[in-house]
Image (cartoon, helix red, strand yellow):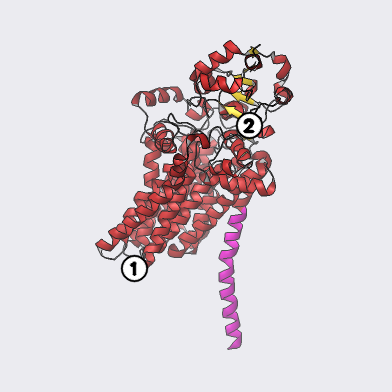
Amino acid sequence: MRLSDDRDSATRAASNLAPCLALGTILVVAALLRGWNLAGGGVIIPYYFAGVRSMLQSWHNLFFNAFDPAGFVSVDKPPIAFWLQTASASVFGFSTASVLLPQMLEGIAAVALLYWLVRRRFGIAAGLLAALFLALSPVDVAVDRSNNTESCLVLVLLLAAWALIRALETEKLMPLLLAALLVGLGFNVKMLVAFGVVPAFTLVYLFGVATPWTRRLAHLSGAAVVLAVVSLSWPLAYDLTPASERPYVDSTEDNSMLELVVGHNFVQRFVRPVGFRQRTARANTAPDTAASIQGRDYAPAGPLRLAAPPLAAQIGWLFPLALIGGLAAWRQHRHAPNREDWQLAMWGGWAVVYGAVFSAAGGLFHAYYLAVMAPALCALAAIGVVALWRYFQKRGSAPLWLPAAIVATALWQAHIVEGYLGGTLAIGHLWLPAALIGTAAMACAALLWRRGLSLPVAGVALAALLAMPAAWSVGTATMRGTAGFPSAQPPFLTDEAATRRGRFAMVAGALTGDPKLIAFLSDGRGNAQFLLAAVNARLAAPIIIATGDPVMALGGFAGRDPILDVDAFSKLVAEDRVRYALIGEGSQGLRRVFGENHQKELTDWIRANGKPVDPALWRSAAPEDRPRSAEAAGAELYDLRPVSSGG
């Protein structure tokens, strides 16, 4: 009897240990993809990187999210993600690795949290698959290796989902208020993007609890109040501070953080005029894919935007599994006593709302926005795989769902890969899509004809379907570090494709300032408050990163903000607070976005009253021998001291 008990205990211990080992392996994979050569291979947006260096210098700069050490202008995003980056840089020293570390940890934590959320109601297998899918999600690997804010947003929204699930289970007010609080924190990570989960959360709670309707509505009203208070606390504190005591709000006309919320970070990104959308579509569409023409992962707005290979490769490799499996899971759980159906609705609503918003977004759009969809799609795909497997083990027509999902996913992946064969991938060509479809077909045949081998065959089929997202994630993890915008990329890029991506990365600017320029400015600065006045933050960022000295971005990020007029700037010059001004950009594309014409009155005054400095005195002779810098792109340096000294 005792021997039998010992065997039972050993069996239970082994059954408990196996999921822990599996989860540990998945987390190791997630950590390797997100942490491999992070210091040398991470993607840094110089604008945000300079902001962290500035925030390290004072509590004032930290609270107001200052871009420059003097607190002249802010960063154009809320502060929470940058506060975490600044804290890391404060502990470990200012470096690319210390600033990227929080995103890496947030990404790993999101994988673990998604496992826990899915496992609680849909089982260990579903939880492990959800964690694995998120660990291998290419766009999430990309953002978790960057200094962007999506990693923090994803983690905060997953925490909000946990609180909502607790509210569904307990039907109590406090978990719902906690969910609202966490979404409000998400608002202070990336503003209105965080509200994409609100419709799904609201409907799920409204119809998913069994309390009286009056109580449900009262609870939701209380949650709305918490959401509004937490969301607006920092923006209102910012706007209520006198303008003279805080930085100018970047990317605004009226120096208002609320304007930034509604204007630059909503209207300009998602609601642009039809004419603008048409011009953008013409500029970014060609007979080949936008990725191979533009060097970026982009597709024009429209119902099929997310089906375009450049964007589907970021996040959509398992979309048929999520769709077919999600429907199968809904059918299986719709009468479940523990409200699994409403948790499915939460994940489905999360994915649908963000998918609709991103498909329709006609303004500024980057592929990394899609990272916020990944948890929902991964959860649906994982829950769906388990549901399809259970149906497959039954008799009748339901077993055909699993082979159909495998074939549909393989065909979908072949469509994505074909979009990259025109001059982007150095391998693959026509055999890669054929291999995907052939493997899926053989797996389905084996599933239907050899039921005794169904489990290993299903495992092989799943591994084959994960090969492409894994390849894109590995390609992203092994790419050479650069300044730019995060985006997943495949391995084995052609030289031409790598060059195109490098050119697009230049839009973000440079991490390294020209050392000759920095030395020249430092030698001639004297007692001036500002080391330099640059026409935009793209020119200012590498100087701030290199020196930590105040550099004035006259027009904010893109050089469009009306921060100073000519009288105010000339007064600063007369007071010897600024001596040098750097204006101008090189390429035609950069001039359209960051060009000096946005500050024409100021640049005309600088040219009329300043003295051009011979480029031989401040520009390195061979910029190609060092990392490309923003100021190497044809900028002009002016000495304004003759004005201040009456010369």
Residue toward you, 153 or 383: 153
Going from N to C along the chain, the mark reached first, 1 or 2, is 1
**Would you say 416 lies left or right of 5 here?**
left
Per the rendering, the mark at residue 99 is none
Q: Residues within 10 Å of mark 1 (few under 14, many from 20)?
A: few
The residue wearing badge 2 is 550
Q: CA distance from mark 1 to mark 2?
A: 61 Å
Can residue 597 be spotted in the picture? yes
Residue 371 vertical placement versus 250 (above, below)? below
Q: Indicate yes or no whether the magenta region holds residue 284.
A: no
Residue toward you, 593 or 465: 593
The residue wearing badge 1 is 337
* Residue type (three-letter) at the residue carrying disc 2: Pro
Residue range highlighted in magenta: 1-28
Tag 1–tag 2 contact (CB < 8 Å): no
Q: Main secondary structure of the magenta part?
A: helix
